[in-house]
Image: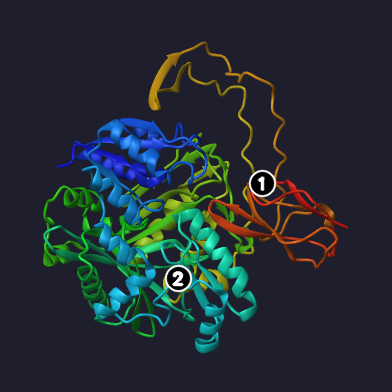
């Protein structure tokens, strides 16, 4: 068994791995960026090492910094979590070259299955049907236009080394091809460190069904459960449930068998997920995620299997603890997972909502679990993924699980940032969801979220809210983090240096439109983020609703639109600039 594990990730998944390792008696090592200096995963780990930098590229995607932390800590295993380096074969090779166990699949399997193009070829070898699309990388807009001319629109441009909807763009006409391709490549590069893309036909009303598999180094592979992940926005999942419900008889078993064949075709071991599209009682291979999935807890709660524990045991060279028959006998009831994201779903726009969590109270009760990467007082940064935590609920059947999830969401308190909870409740209460009549496009095309408003800011703390006199802080010695507790006078802590001006509050705006008070020509951004592209020039005539800049926040690109027609008088930003909520980026007269 491994003795010390470094978690090359942050947030909720790092916390999840730390807890599983601690239960196994394994020491844990965290790594952190400048912004995550006092994050929850850092506070929980036995040791923590600074990576430096602010953005993901400067920190969690800095191979040399992570390898240095492995060397300094003496870790004999590395868990990559999901995102960042989790599907990077070169990183896995760099780990194993140091004699350290990579808690994931072999690099060769990541190469073939982590690349969505070659994984389609592997699926074909395994006998799984695939959605019509390319089996080679696409490098030019002309290739995409030619595919659209042959198969028709809409088509999907996808990140070849991505997942979770990141770097995916739907193209509905030839005119959209160039901009969609560039945007997909930028998002893919920002989130996964690579910008290769491929294309496939975009189905009209599909369900997203995936199969959790686990294999060991002795050649055994089992499928643990199916999951339905059809409630999505921007091709990213909001709600997942296990097992997949309401499919034609025999389809679930056929999916499980196809997933095992695909995994064995590339010599796969450790945890992985094979994703399928299901429509009209047929299923098509979509891709394989060569890592642990965000939604793995719904599989855990219906089986009683700790998938992270299995990952660690497999990486330590142990055989799978159960056969396929034993796994099947474990399944009980129904489970639902709600991703609590820092987004404002008002009007169905799901705008990123980074900021300070002033209060977080998780629900409790029978069959309720909450996996989080934050606590009250923590900050959700614009530079990283916006997942705050995951609410996982079990019930004896699907209706019970839905009712219990609604109750738990109603109890949950998150203040200081907007979250997706109001949209989650609208989904769970909708007859289409309860009857399993929704698809991956249902949230954006059918669900009415027009009645959801942005949350009101919390009331200021009263004078009676006196802080505790025991305080904690952190120090770094040669790049290693130490937590220190101090007893100090019971007086407010004041930061040294000149006072900073208060940030201008964000104004309410619909969709990706810039806020423009009373129809003025000032185009304001509704959230903090980074300008990735300016779409207009001084002197250019623009129409109301026309996009003027592209803003990236929490790894998502958002078009900021003009709210009035006129001529561009001034551009106040350039690509690469960081802006805050309410900042004016373009002036129109």
In the rendered structure, the answer to whether residue 193 lies left or right of residue 121 reads right
In the picture, measured across the screen, residue 43 lies left or right of residue 167, that is left
Residue at the (40%, 53%) spot, across then down: 83
Comparing marks 2 and 1, which lies closer to the viewer?
Answer: 1
Residue 415 in the image: state x and y as whole percent.
55, 42
Q: Would you identify the image quadrant in which residue 350 lies?
A: bottom right
Residue 194, x across and y down, in percent? 45, 58
* Residue 510 vs residue 256, the one in the foreground: 256
Give the numbered dot on residue 433: 2
Above or below 117: residue 22 = above
Quarter of the figure with residue 246: bottom left
**Residue depicted at 25% across the width and 33% down the height:** 74
Count of labels shown? 2
Q: Earlier in the sequence, mark 2 or mark 1?
A: 2
Q: Are marks 2 and 1 in contact (CB under 8 Å)?
A: no
Residue named by callout 1? 577
Quadrant occupied by the C terminus: bottom right
Scheme of image coloration: rainbow
Q: CA distance from mark 2 to mark 1?
A: 41 Å
**Which residue: 41% across, 62% down?**
161
Image quarter (top left, top right, bottom left or bottom right) of the N terminus:
top left
- Where in the figure is residue 72, as x and y percent of width and height? 30, 31
Q: Position of residue 316 (x, y in %)?
A: 16, 47
The local crowd at label 2, few if under 14, some if 14 to 19, many if 20 or more residues have their Cα within 10 Å, is some
Query: Residue at horizontal 41%, vertical 75%?
Result: 136
> Residue 498 vs residue 357: left or right?
right
């Amino acid at each position: 068994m491994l003795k010390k594990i470094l978690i090359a990730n942050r947030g909720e998944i790092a916390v999840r791995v730390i807890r599983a390792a601690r239960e196994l008696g394994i020491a844990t090592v965290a790594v952190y960026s400048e912004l995550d200096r006092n994050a929850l995963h850092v506070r929980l780990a036995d040791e923590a090492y600074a990576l430096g930098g602010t953005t993901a590229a400067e920190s969690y995607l800095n191979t040399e910094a992570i390898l240095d932390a492995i060397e300094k800590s003496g870790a004999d295993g590395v868990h990559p979590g999901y995102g960042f380096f989790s599907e990077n074969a070169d990183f896995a090779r760099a780990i194993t070259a140091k004699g350290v166990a990579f808690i994931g699949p072999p690099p060769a399997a990541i190469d073939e299955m982590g690349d969505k193009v070659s994984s389609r070829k592997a699926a074909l070898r395994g006998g799984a049907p695939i959605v019509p699309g390319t089996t080679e990388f696409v490098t030019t807009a002309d290739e995409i236009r030619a595919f659209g001319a042959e198969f028709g629109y809409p088509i999907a441009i996808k990140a070849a080394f991505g997942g979770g909807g990141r770097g995916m763009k739907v193209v509905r006409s030839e005119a959209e091809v160039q901009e969609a391709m560039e945007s997909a490549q930028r998002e893919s590069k920002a989130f996964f460190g690579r910008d290769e893309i491929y294309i496939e036909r975009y189905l009209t009303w599909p369900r997203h069904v995936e199969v959790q598999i686990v294999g060991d180094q002795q050649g055994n592979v089992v499928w643990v459960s199916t999951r339905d992940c059809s409630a999505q926005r921007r091709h990213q999942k909001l709600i997942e449930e296990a097992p997949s419900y309401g499919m034609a008889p025999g389809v679930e078993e056929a999916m499980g068998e196809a997933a095992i064949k695909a995994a064995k075709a590339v010599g796969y071991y450790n945890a992985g997920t094979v994703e399928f599209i299901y429509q009209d009682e047929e299923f098509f291979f979509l891709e394989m995620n060569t890592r642990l999935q965000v939604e793995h807890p719904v599989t855990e709660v219906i089986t009683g299997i700790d998938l992270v524990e299995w990952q660690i045991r497999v990486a330590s060279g142990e055989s799978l603890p159960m056969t396929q028959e034993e796994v099947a006998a474990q399944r009980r009831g129904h489970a639902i997972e709600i991703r609590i994201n820092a987004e404002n779903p008002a009007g169905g726009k799901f705008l990123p909502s980074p900021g300070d969590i002033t209060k977080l109270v998780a629900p409790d009760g029978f069959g309720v679990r909450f996996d989080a990467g934050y606590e009250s007082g923590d900050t959700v940064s614009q530079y990283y993924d916006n997942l705050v935590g995951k609410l996982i609920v079990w019930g004896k059947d699907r209706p019970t699980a839905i009712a219990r999830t609604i109750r738990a969401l109603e109890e949950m308190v998150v203040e200081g940032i907007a979250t997706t909870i109001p949209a989650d409740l609208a989904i769970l209460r909708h007859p289409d969801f309860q009857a399993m009549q929704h698809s991956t496009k249902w949230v954006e095309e059918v669900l009415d979220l027009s009645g959801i408003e942005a949350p009101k800011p919390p009331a200021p703390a009263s004078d009676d809210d006196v802080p505790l006199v025991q305080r904690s802080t952190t120090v770094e010695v040669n790049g290693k983090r130490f937590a220190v507790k101090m007893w100090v006078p019971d007086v407010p802590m004041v930061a040294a240096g000149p006072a900073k001006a208060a940030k201008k509050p964000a104004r309410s705006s619909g969709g990706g439109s810039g806020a423009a008070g009373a129809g003025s020509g000032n185009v304001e951004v509704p959230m903090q983020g980074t300008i990735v592209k300016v779409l207009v020039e001084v002197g250019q005539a623009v129409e109301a609703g026309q996009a003027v800049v592209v803003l990236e926040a929490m790894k998502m690109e958002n078009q900021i639109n003009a709210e009035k027609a006129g001529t561009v008088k001034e551009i106040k930003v350039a690509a690469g600039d960081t802006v805050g909520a309410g900042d004016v980026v373009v002036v129109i007269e």
